[in-house]
Structure formats: C-alpha cells, structure tokens
Amino acid sequence: MHILVTGGAGYIGSHVVKQLIEKTQHRISIIDNLSTGHQSTIDTLQSISITNKRDPVAFYIEDLKNFSAVENIFKTASFDAVIHFAASIVVPESVENPLKYYMNNTVNTTHLIHLCNQYRIKHFIFSSTAAVYGEPSEPQVTETTRTLPINPYGRSKLMSEQVLQDASKENSTFSHVILRYFNVAGADLSNRIGQSFPNATHLIKIAAQTAIGSRESMMIFGDDYPTPDGTCIRDYIHVEDLASAHLKALDYLEEGSASNTFNVGYGHGFSVKEVIATMKEVSQVDFEVFTAARRAGDPAVLISNNSKIKKVLGWSASCDELALICQTALAWEKTL
Ligand SMILES: NC(=O)c1ccc[n+]([C@@H]2O[C@H](COP(=O)([O-])OP(=O)(O)OC[C@H]3O[C@@H](n4cnc5c(N)ncnc54)[C@H](O)[C@@H]3O)[C@@H](O)[C@H]2O)c1
C-alpha cells in the first residue's frame, strides 16, 4: 500500500514511519508543515530507509490548511491509506486560542477526510486522545465510557472522530480506526528519534529536561488527590508500543474489517511522584521539585481499559516498564 502520514516529522508520527520502514513493505509519503516537527527527523527517517534498503520516504513540506496544495498531492500520489497525526496538541493553549485548535484539528481533518472520499482512499487511521473522556467518573475507561471533553483540544479531537464516523457510514469503501492514546512517552530504543519540541507539556519530558538541567526545577500540580500518595495517576505508554498499534490497525483495515475505535494504553498507571522518583533513579540526579495547587480539569486517575485492542487487533506491549520509558526519554533529551 501507499500510505500518507500527516505529521510524520513529529514525535509519534516519526516513530510510526520508522516502524513502517523497518517492519513493512508499504510505500510512505509524509506531509508536514514543520511547525513542531523537524527536518532533522525526516533526515533520520531517510537514513533509516537507506539502511533498510527501502526507497526514500516522499516528503512534502506543506500545511494541511492549504487545501488546493494538499489536493494536488492527492491527485498525483494515489494513496491507499492515510495515518493522520498532524494537529495542535497543547491543552492550555487550546483554552487560550480555541479557534487555532478547531481550525488545525477539526477543519483540516474534515478536509482531509473529504479528499479521501473524493480520491477513493480506502483507509484512515486517526490519532485521538484520552482527553475525549474529560473527567470520567470511573478511573479505568473503556471505549464506551461517556465522552465529555473539558477543553477545546479534546473537543476538537472528538468532533474529528464524529466527522470520520459519519463519513465512513456514508461510504462503504472507506473504513477507519480511531486510536485514543493515553500518556505517550519515551523514545526510539536505538535513540535515533524522540520528542524534540522544547515546549512540550508532558510530565516525563519535563522530568527528563529537569534531570539534565535544561530546567532548574519542576512542579507537581496538586498532592491532595484521593490516590495513595496524593498525586494524579496516569497510564504512560512507550511510544514504540503506541507505534506498533498503528501497524496492527493498518493490517486490520487491510483485511477488510469494519471501522472501529480503540484505547491505546497499558491498563495500569503511575502517580506523578512515582514518575519523578523513577526519573531521579535512572538519571541519578536529585533535581528540585515543588508542589503547586491543583490545575483545573485534571482527574485524579485516568487509566485505559485496553482489553479491546488486545482482543480485536491482537496488539500487545513490549516496553511496559516505567524505568525503560524514563531511560529512553532521558537518553533522547541528552541528544537535543
Ligand atoms: N503526545 C501525546 O501524548 C499525545 C496523546 C494523545 C494524542 N496525541 C495525538 O497524536 C498526534 C501526534 O502528536 P505528537 O505528540 O507527535 O505531536 P507533534 O507536535 O510532535 O507532531 C505533530 C506534527 O504535525 C505537524 N503539523 C501540525 N499541524 C500541521 C498542519 N496544519 N499541516 C501539516 N503539518 C502539521 C507538526 O509540524 C508535527 O510534526 C496528534 O494528533 C495528537 O493530538 C498525542
């Protein structure tokens, strides 16, 4: 198949492209505007292609908002499937500038789905998020848990899911998989690619930055939650395991299976304090940590129920170890 990967110069997209190069024979094209992605990531992916004796990845530096330019790519390239990562992803920014999120996430995704229908693309894999669940009443969420996002980022993603579901109902030759990621962290086990965006807001990235001294200290937001140590518990998934879920989803769609939605997480979690203690241990640096007030909209516990993806896609984890997640994140941070 010829796969279009949007956002392939970014953190998660680049790990999926790497696995597509190393583990499949699919032809790969990337569209990315390099707003948070990097040319150096594309260069690394090209050298991984050479090592694996594969054709180079076709790379289009383009913004999805340039509808006619993107359509021109569709006209000439003849894709079979789209894996759509490109998005704006910073929750606090989405509260300050919601229209940026609705335009870049919902509007551009809608246009991409429209092009898929127009150019008879068969399959679409969409990067969604646990943020669509908002503040669920149960700590472990299944795919049927009520979706009630509490910020524009989560709403922009949920609306994109709904557009995709409606478009697939309308078109029997178009099928999709929605993957709802939990807390993605870590980096390529060979330390060639990782999360390079300096303003990322993810806990493990911030702990790694603090361990190597690019931040003086870090904050814990709230230590009075109803959890064993008072800090929030999240389901951290290594980016390699998340990436492999996309390859499973692609196989599933290629076999002709029906459109579906899956949580992607490990089904268990760690507290903020446990993550910080692990980062201190793997880095051997006792960095400074302050406690601040709770942030609005942080549920005490958010963990995936991952039975569905295991059963239906046959997905399984191979990097489910907090120390490994922290070690790979730290090793990558040192390269930046
Ligand atoms: N990182 C996480 O923990 C997490 C969790 C849940 C869901 N997600 C979803 O995963 C996807 C990828 O996230 P990431 O962490 O890799 O982010 P990222 O910022 O590293 O990657 C996004 C990529 O998309 C590109 N991009 C953004 N807008 C674009 C546009 N209009 N046109 C072309 N390219 C554009 C960026 O340059 C970047 O390379 C996103 O859709 C995000 O919502 C991420």
Image (cartoon, grey):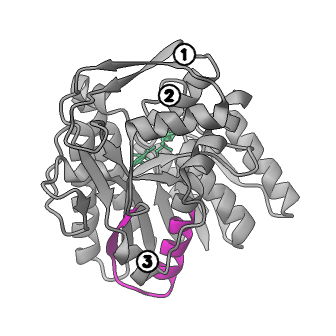
Whether residue 249 appears in magenta in the rendering, the answer is yes
Residue at the extreme top of the image, as rendered: 216
Relative depth, front residue between 331 and 25 = 331
Q: Which residues are magenta?
A: 244-264
Label 3 sits on a secondary structure element that is: helix
Q: Where is residue 215 shown, x and y percent of the image?
A: 54, 16
User: Are the residues tagged 1 and 2 within 8 Å (C-beta)?
Assistant: yes
Q: Which mark is residue 206?
A: 2
Q: Which mark is residue 310?
A: 3
Q: Circle 3: is it few (<14), some (14-19), or many (20+) Cα within 10 Å? A: some
Relative depth, front residue between 86 and 78 = 86
Is 258 situated above or below 330?
below
Is 235 situated above or below 248?
above
Label 1 sits on a secondary structure element that is: loop
* On-image quarter of the C terminus: top right
User: Are the residues tagged 1 and 3 within 8 Å (C-beta)?
Assistant: no
Which residue does the image show at 50% across and 75% down from the upper left? 315
Cα gap from disc 1 to disc 2, whole angstroms: 8 Å
Q: Earlier in the sequence, mark 1 or mark 2?
A: 2
Q: Which mark is residue 215?
A: 1
